[in-house]
Amino acid sequence: MLVNKWFNSWFCFQRFNPSLIKIAISVAFLTQSLEVNSQDLIELSLEELANIQITSVSKRRESINDAAASIFVITNNDIQRSGVSSLPEALRLAPNLQVAQDSARNYAITARGFNSVFNNKLLVLIDGRTVYSPLFSGVFWDAQDVVLEDIDRIEVISGAGATLWGANAVNGVINIITKTASQTQGGLVSLSGSGEESYLSIRYGGALDNGGNFRVYGKHADRNDNTNPATRRSLDDGFNRDKAGFRSDWVNENKKLTLQGDFYDGYLSQSNTNDIQISGANLLARMNTTLSNGSNLSLQGYLDYTYRKQPATFKENLTTADIEVKHDWKLSDKHNFTWGGGYRAGFDRLENDGVAFMPASKNLNWGNVFAQDEIMLTEKLRMILGMKLEHNNYTGLEYLPNARLAWKFADNQLLWTSASRSVHAPSRIDKDFIAPGFISLVGGPHFGTEKAYTYEVGYRATPTNKTSISVTGFYTEYDELRTLDLDLSALELEFKNKASARSHGLEMWGAWQVIDDLKLSGGLVVQDVRLNTSQTDILQDTGFGINDASSHSLLRISYDISPNHLLDATARYMGKLRKLDVPAYTALDIRYGWKINKDLEFSIVGQNLLDSKHIEYADPVRTSAASPEYDRRLFAKVQWYFR
């Protein structure tokens, strides 16, 4: 605790100590003649970015320029130059995501609508491991963390991805992929913070005697509580979290093997009761091998344990075991076939406190098989047909088809269209939940899957070697969406499937390398989501329904003042959240990076520079007056690489 207090005071830029500036300048004069570290990430050109290899669209490596989907890739260079401090903040760099900070530790993140801190229509993976909770089929973002310097890329798909990724990939997929162990050799100490938060990452990588490579890491993160703008009292929403882990990779001519694991522990502040306790651990193994016929076989399995004690609500121990096999087989010059299957078992053990899940303990099972064929109709025209069959405890067998057509009518231009069906399978809160009271809130015994039918058309091009553009139009019909219906005769609020919705919109983003040292990039999303629901549904009246901005946009400017001095600016616009009475806002962040020598870099970030303060999200259980406000602040970071 004493270290944390010292660390926060060191970074308290509201009372920035001038002596620190003197120290930094002194270090610079002593080391300015040294060359820039050759291990620093080399910024890719736009032409190289247009051909970056991705895996999320077809579950095999392909150029993003050939992907028939609305996908944006956040690179490691994007993350480093933006100066973001956490994983959710890094996701703001994807123009096809809507990210809103709800508290010091929690975020509402979505693609194409239905944004909420309990969003259940977005699938999130970290190195192939699904990180959603079966309690509500969403993500506890307060428990997710990685060393930002170790991220290779984040692939963000907006639109359905259920054919390959399964239920809950209704509106999008976020696939966070870290670097291999061979890419993180040597040591790193990264220290960053402001007067409100602090982060410390330590990582070391080396070679193994048997030809492999490894890395180990530890990370500490903490954030002070926000202040209630109405009462000026603490909102008790801060956190303190520690994490450690490892990764090892072995590569030979025909085989790749990965073994990695993580452990975390922390506490989350909350009002009027004890802190929330969180902890967890996971272990993952993955093997990729090339068979004698040239096809590729992949086998992955992982164990994941999470613990969450939320006083006055519940205590959960969840153990998950998952295994998946995938086979990529080029049947002929015209057929590229991918098939596989998987099984996941979840052992959920709850202790009810205040609310109840009945039964408290439950074994959950998901099984699936999938197949997809990429058919070359002509030299420039491809058809992709796929189907996934998935079985779950609550609704049995679900079918998830997908059809795509891609026309690469020029080497640098792709026109594509798609149609797909996806579902959100019930979670435990939909079926097993009970909150007693004068009017009880209960899960619906007959609650079924929410269904979505999505139609897209897109265009992606690199008109020149200095410009790139992607445009996607989409239309989605949602049926049997969740409602919370009031039954006065039984004095109950029950989850049912009585709503439907229609959404349509346009997503576009692009980049322009103006000169060698100056790059502009940005994106815009406009959308309209309309909900039709029952007269007895109270979700809309309480603000838990459609809480999405009709438009949001992003603009980034990256300028290399010199090889050792970098300047970046990021401007974000978010439209009004009408149901939550959150006004539209524009935020501007500016980062200056200084490569002091080949091993040492210092950066400073000014955040939210346009407004003295703004609100991003209002939890429906609070009034907007009690929602945290985010004001201007300075954030500093020091990175030291060593051998």
Image (tube, grey):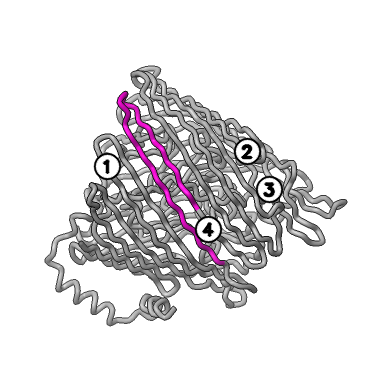
Which residue does the image show at 50% across and 50% down from the upper left?
A: 131
Specify the segment rendered in magenta.
277-304
Which residue type does callout 4 highlight? Tyr
Residue 356 falls in image quadrant: bottom right
Q: Name the residue under label 2.
A: 502
Residue 430 - label: 3
Binning the other alpha carbons within 10 Å of mark 1 as few (below 14), some (14 to 19) or many (20 upward) gives some
Find numbered disc 3 in the image and state the secondary structure of the residue it sits on: helix
Q: Name the foreground residue: 57 vs 331.
A: 331
Residue 177 shown in magenta = no
Most common SS among magenta residues: strand
Please state which of the two labelled residues, at mark 2 or mark 3, is closer to the viewer.
3
Residue 435 - label: none
> How far is mark 4 from mark 2, CA to CA?
25 Å
Q: Earlier in the sequence, mark 4 or mark 1?
A: 4
Which residue type does callout 3 highlight? Asp
Find numbered disc 1 in the image and state the secondary structure of the residue it sits on: strand
Which residue does the image show at 29% across and 51% down from the upper left?
A: 181
Verify CB contact (< 8 Å) between mark 4 and mark 3.
no
> How far is mark 1 from mark 2, CA to CA?
48 Å
Which residue type does callout 2 highlight? Arg
> How far is mark 2 from mark 3, CA to CA?
22 Å
Verify CB contact (< 8 Å) between mark 4 and mark 1.
no
Q: Name the residue under label 1.
A: 251
> How far is mark 4 from mark 1, CA to CA?
38 Å
Please state which of the two labelled residues, at mark 4 or mark 3, is closer to the viewer.
3
Residue 373 falls in image quadrant: top left
> Whole-percent x and y of residue 257?
33, 43
Q: Name the residue under label 4.
A: 107
Which residue type does callout 1 highlight? Val
Which residue does the image show at 41% across and 25% down from the upper left?
A: 337
